[in-house]
């Protein structure tokens, strides 16, 4: 079989290649209408993961809802006025009818239960059954609210300017759709009040909706920008269209396969089109070399064959390196990341297949006179870009020790920056500070107990243990301990209900706002409360064997560090106060912490795996461990500098950013492969003595930087252009990813052109022992 059989076949049968591509593409395109979207963070981990199984069992045990929306109502003076209370009543009533709302458990002034004593017994009824009509009635309501710890920071702020409506959602309800329905209700109740809607389901589903909307806009924008950039580089519409066509076909095939296999689209694989579009820019090396070859030979067919012979091996191995870098994502625990990695690997393989078939076929069909006019400027002696790149390489080659010293200093600085990296997946923070969701979360968290919810589940060694005074006092002590944490706004447990019943049955005497002294009394109080209140009031905080108690912990931030502080404080309290109770965290805040932890270790594991696999690929490609090590340096340098900048910039390392680690390795090694492969080709063509002669070696290095290096810079520029559209996103992860990929591409393109010449000159005695490249 010929070395480039596919290329030769494509040149001989260009129309057949085009026909095959055009016939196959509709089959993949037909899968796209089956697309399913998934923005639920729970699905980031497998259903069998320990945290999901545990959280599901806690939800079932205590009758909890997966999702809750918090509606904030703020009055400039006090929400305790007739007009605002009427609005709260009417809004609450209308919210009950919104599709997806679990109406029976909506909590507001007019629906939340209040425990009072009546005729020597216990009365549990809605807090506000009749809107106060005068100051005396308002003052009575104020007294009722602020003497009850269950209400303060839960439905009324301490400065009484804010109240909230807690809106639990039925399983499977879309948070954005419910929030939109609530917004329509709020729009009908305008006045002095300001309204805010917050909560994880709102952020999650709004992010999902915007994410897919942006991808529908950004992908075509990136295609157009890339098309214009390629045309500006090569001055040929057909060639520009061919690269865009390769990218479009690859995107359709890849998305078609992913959707066809039943994978839902999540935040990561929604970025697949942009990533593939950017990876497709590696084909620029083919066009770059083709123009040089055609200018020299004036023979189109010969130029195509010679081009593919010259760049074919580097292009194949850069594809393999990129695929390998992303394939490590398949070994991660975060499910959408695994799917994203698989899709990118498939897309990269398709891109390289089309690079050796569709691109040669299209080049065959382009008229020679058009190519000739555009190729006239491809002269490394006169082209300004080529001369600038040669000058960069000249600095490295002529001052290798200084270049290496500067690099070591930058690495040391980057190490300091890396030590400051914080890993945090806060979906609310994925919106800009000026966004409605971010503002709502800030306002409500400042005024109330918090919009993020975690649990601490206390499990006793036998049934009815929760009814014991010592158990409840232990739980109460833990609550007070947790409430000292800056991130904790409020805690609620069965203890609060028992204390409330004890107080109201003793004429509301504050002295009895305490846990009773006997288990029998506690049992009676719990029975009285359970027969009078809504089932969920007690169900949410204790199980019926009374062996487990659930402590609600409201957090003022969605940062994973908040729940981590709760866990540490719980462990500290347990060490200082030994108990037979098992204390275990749960809830969405705990899930986010575990997911965050998975991202950290997946990032470390993926990075190390990618390093190992890429080194093997480099060794196999260069057939030399020495050259693999040299090619490795820009890769490591790029990654370290990027992570250092992330640390110094104070950016949290979230899920999208973790994927950059694989991308940085894949692209940095691509450029090293192209540089070293073409350098070795040039040295072979220059003769056996070229490597031994320092002047000849430097000349070859400058040629490599000027000619193949121009392809490297074009590749980096196109990659950066493709991602530049993300800078205009309203979502911060997209902006961050866009900014760092642009920086990464420019850095990973410049470093090989500067540091490889320096390293090769410094290490030439070790690299060229026999006088010629291996």
Image (cartoon, rainbow, N blue to C red):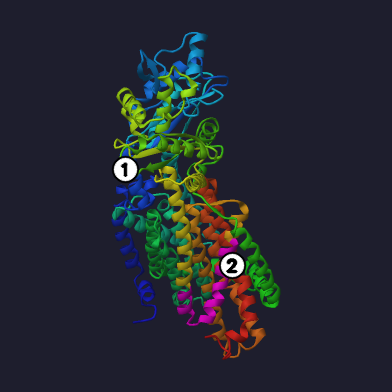
Asked whether 199 falls inside the magenta stretch, the response is no
Residue 474 in the image: above or below residue 689 = above
Q: Position of residue 206 (x, y in %)?
A: 43, 39
How far from the left and from the top, in percent, is residue 506? 43, 19
Q: Position of residue 291 (x, y in %)?
A: 52, 70
Q: Residue 690 versus residue 128: which sits nearer the camera? A: 128
Name, please, the residue furthest toward the front.
Answer: 518
**Is residue 41 shown above or below 251?**
above
Could you give the CA–CA distance between mark 2 and mark 1, rounded to whole angstroms? 58 Å
Relative depth, front residue between 290 and 396: 396
The answer to which image quadrant residue 65 occupies is: top left
SS class, disc 1: loop
Question: Label 2 belongs to which residue?
Answer: 637
Numbered-mark total: 2
What segment is highlighted magenta in the picture? Answer: 615-641
Left or right position of 672 against 595: right
- The residue carrying mark 1 is 462
Of callouts 2 and 1, the N-terminal one: 1
Magenta stretch, main secondary structure class: helix
């Amino acid at each position: 079989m010929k070395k480039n059989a596919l290329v030769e076949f494509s040149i001989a049968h260009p129309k057949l290649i085009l026909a095959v591509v055009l016939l196959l593409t509709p089959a993949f395109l037909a899968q796209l209408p089956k697309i399913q979207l998934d923005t639920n963070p729970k699905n980031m981990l497998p259903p069998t993961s320990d945290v999901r199984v545990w959280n599901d069992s806690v939800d079932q045990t205590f009758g909890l809802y997966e999702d809750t929306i918090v509606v904030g109502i703020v009055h400039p003076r006090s929400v305790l006025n007739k007009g605002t209370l009427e609005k709260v009543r009417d809004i609450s009533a209308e919210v009950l009818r919104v599709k997806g709302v679990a109406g029976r458990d909506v909590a507001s002034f007019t629906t939340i239960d209040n425990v009072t004593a009546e005729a020597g017994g216990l009365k549990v009824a809605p807090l506000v059954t009749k809107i106060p009509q005068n100051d005396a009635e308002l003052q009575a309501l104020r007294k009722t609210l602020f003497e009850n710890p269950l209400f303060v920071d839960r439905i009324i702020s301490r400065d009484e300017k804010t109240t909230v409506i807690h809106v639990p959602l039925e399983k499977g309800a879309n948070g954005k759709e419910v929030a939109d329905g609530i917004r329509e209700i709020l729009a009908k109740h305008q006045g002095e009040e300001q309204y805010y809607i917050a909560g994880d389901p709102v952020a999650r589903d709004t992010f999902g909706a915007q994410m897919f909307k942006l991808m529908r806009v950004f992908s075509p924008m990136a295609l157009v920008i890339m098309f214009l950039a390629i045309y500006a580089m090569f001055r040929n519409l057909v060639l520009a269209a061919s690269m865009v066509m390769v990218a479009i076909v690859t995107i359709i095939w890849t998305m078609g396969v992913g959707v066809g296999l039943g994978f839902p689209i999540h935040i990561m694989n929604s970025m697949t089109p942009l990533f593939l579009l950017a990876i497709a820019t590696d084909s620029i090396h083919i066009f770059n070399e083709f123009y040089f070859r055609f200018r020299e030979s004036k023979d189109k067919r010969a130029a195509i064959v010679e081009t593919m012979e010259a760049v074919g091996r580097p292009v194949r191995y850069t594809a393999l390196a990129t695929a390998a870098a992303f394939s490590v994502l398949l070994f991660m625990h975060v499910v959408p990341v695994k799917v994203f990695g698989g899709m990118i690997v498939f897309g990269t393989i398709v891109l390289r297949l089309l690079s050796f078939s569709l691109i040669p076929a299209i080049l065959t069909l382009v008229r020679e006179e058009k190519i000739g006019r555009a190729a006239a400027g491809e002269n490394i002696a006169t082209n300004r870009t080529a001369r600038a790149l040669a000058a960069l390489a000249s600095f490295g080659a002529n001052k290798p020790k200084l270049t290496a010293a500067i690099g070591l200093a930058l690495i040391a600085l980057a190490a300091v920056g890396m030590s400051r990296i914080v890993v945090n997946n806060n979906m609310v923070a994925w919106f800009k500070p000026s966004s409605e969701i971010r503002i709502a979360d800030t306002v409500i968290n400042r005024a109330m107990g918090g919009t993020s919810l975690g649990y601490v589940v206390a499990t006793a060694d036998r049934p009815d243990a929760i009814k014991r005074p010592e158990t409840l006092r232990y739980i109460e002590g833990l609550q007070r301990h947790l409430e000292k944490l800056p991130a904790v706004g409020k805690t609620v447990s069965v203890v609060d209900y028992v204390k409330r019943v004890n107080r109201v049955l003793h004429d509301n005497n504050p002295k009895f706002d305490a846990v009773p002294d006997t288990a029998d009394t506690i049992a009676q109080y719990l029975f009285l409360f359970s027969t009078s209140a809504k089932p969920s009031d007690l169900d949410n905080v204790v199980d019926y064997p009374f062996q487990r108690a659930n402590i609600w912990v409201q957090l003022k931030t969605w940062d994973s560090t908040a729940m981590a502080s709760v866990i540490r404080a719980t462990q500290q309290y347990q060490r200082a106060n030994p108990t037979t109770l098992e204390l275990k965290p749960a809830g969405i805040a705990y899930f986010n912490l575990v997911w965050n932890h998975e991202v950290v270790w997946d990032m470390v594991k993926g990075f190390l795996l990618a390093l190992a696999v890429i080194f093997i690929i480099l060794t196999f490609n260069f057939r030399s461990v020495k050259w693999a090590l040299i090619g490795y340096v820009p890769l490591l340098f790029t990654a370290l500098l990027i992570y250092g900048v992330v640390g110094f910039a104070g950016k949290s390392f979230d899920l999208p950013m973790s994927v950059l680690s694989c991308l940085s390795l894949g692209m940095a090694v691509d450029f090293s492969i192209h540089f070293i492969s073409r350098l070795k080709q040039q040295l072979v063509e220059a003769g056996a003595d070229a490597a031994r002669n320092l002047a000849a070696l430097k000349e070859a290095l400058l040629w490599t930087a000027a000619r193949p290096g121009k392809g490297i810079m074009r590749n980096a520029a196109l990659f950066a252009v493709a991602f530049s559209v993300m800078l205009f996103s309203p979502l911060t992860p997209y902006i961050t990813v866009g900014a760092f990929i642009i920086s990464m591409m420019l850095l990973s393109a410049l470093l090989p052109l500067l540091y490889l010449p320096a390293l090769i000159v410094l290490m030439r005695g070790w690299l060229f022992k026999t006088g010629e490249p291996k």
